């Protein structure tokens, strides 16, 4: 006669979270995973694992203090969990070093709503040029993922924007750059939507406007004329 086997049934949560929670209960160990750390904290709170909730909360706080890019990962997780308070705190942590946050892979994971929320805060626009380039890079990666066909003239359909931007390396925000754009200005503009206007173009240096913003094609002729008129007054 075979022995009866016990079957454990857990609430409908991420199985990775339960695996982490049970591991902590038996070994006092766990692994930080930005993709589900917010869900892990919620699970511990909901089911009364106060010690583990405190450990996870402390780990999140440590990330907020040390790593702007990893704070964005927490913000994404908080948004998926509907935890607006945590998302707001995570964004605030990322603003401690907005350039690191905007140039990180985590920035590219933001959806359109989160991008608009992030870029719309004055703490994200301490440097308009860095924000402008980050917005264009985000839009290009998203367009590539969507298999957009609106390529710039001379850019092969097989060209990968991720590789093109990586090859461009670190860009000096005070020096105009030949941006490695793959898609048309109209496509980028449409993809960015309201987030494009979080960039305060009139505050940019006139040379950067002429040598970066104008060739990108993301502003209409009327918008560009208004910005340039403001810049020279």
Image (cartoon, grey):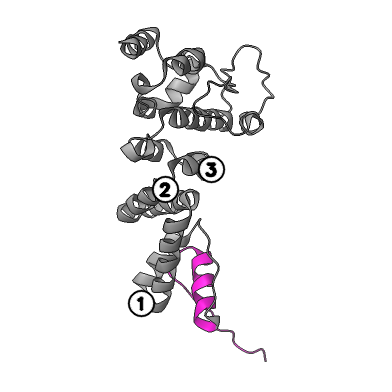
Badge count: 3
In terms of sequence position, does the residue under pointer 3 or pointer 2 come before the other? 2
Secondary element at image label 3: loop
Return the x and y of residue 60 as percentages of the image width and height. Answer: 43, 62
Camera-nearest residue between 212 and 231: 231
State which quarter of the image contains the C terminus. top left
Left of 192 or right of it: where is 84? left
Quickly name the residue at label 2. Answer: 94
Mark 2 and mark 1: Cα distance apart in space: 30 Å
Quickly name the residue at label 1. Answer: 48
Q: Please say whether residue 208 is one of the residues in the magenta stretch.
A: no
**Does 84 appear above or below 105?**
below
Q: Residue at x 37, y 34 (%)?
A: 125
Camera-nearest residue between 207 and 224: 207
Camera-nearest residue between 72 and 227: 227
Q: Residue at x 60, y 23 (%)?
A: 180
Neighbours of disc 1 within 10 Å: few (<14), some (14-19), many (20+): few
Secondary element at image label 2: helix
Q: Which residues are magenta?
A: 1-26
Q: Please say whether residue 13 is one of the residues in the magenta stretch.
A: yes
Q: Residue at x 38, y 35 (%)?
A: 126
Tell me whether the residue at label 3 lies in contact with that at label 2, contact meaning CB atoms closer than 8 angstroms: no
Camera-nearest residue between 13 and 180: 180
Q: Quadrant of residue 95?
A: top left
**Residue 203 in sight from this viewpoint:** yes
State which quarter of the image contains the N terminus. bottom right
Return the x and y of residue 31 as percentages of the image width and height. Answer: 55, 68
Q: Which mark is residue 104?
A: 3
């Amino acid at each position: 006669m075979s022995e009866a086997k016990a079957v454990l049934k857990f609430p409908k949560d991420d199985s990775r979270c339960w695996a982490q929670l049970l591991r902590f209960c038996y070994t006092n160990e766990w692994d930080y995973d930005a993709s589900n750390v917010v869900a892990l904290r919620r699970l511990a709170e909901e089911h009364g694992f106060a010690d583990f909730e405190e450990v996870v909360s402390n780990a999140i706080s440590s990330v907020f203090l040390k790593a702007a890019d990893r704070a964005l990962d927490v913000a994404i997780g908080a948004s998926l969990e509907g935890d607006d308070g945590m998302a707001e705190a995570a964004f605030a942590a990322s603003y401690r070093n907005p350039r690191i946050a905007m140039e990180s892979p985590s920035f590219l994971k933001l959806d359109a709503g989160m991008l608009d929320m992030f870029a719309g805060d004055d703490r994200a626009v301490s440097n308009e040029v860095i924000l402008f380039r980050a917005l264009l890079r985000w839009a290009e990666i998203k367009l590539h993922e969507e298999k957009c066909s609106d390529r710039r003239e001379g850019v092969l359909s097989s060209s990968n924007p991720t590789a093109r931007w990586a090859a461009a390396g670190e860009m000096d925000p005070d020096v105009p750059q030949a941006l490695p754009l793959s898609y048309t200005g109209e496509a980028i503009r449409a993809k960015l939507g309201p987030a494009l206007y979080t960039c305060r173009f009139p505050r940019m240096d006139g040379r950067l406007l002429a040598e970066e913003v104008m060739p990108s094609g993301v502003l209409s002729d009327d918008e560009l004329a208004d910005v340039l008129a403001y810049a020279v007054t």
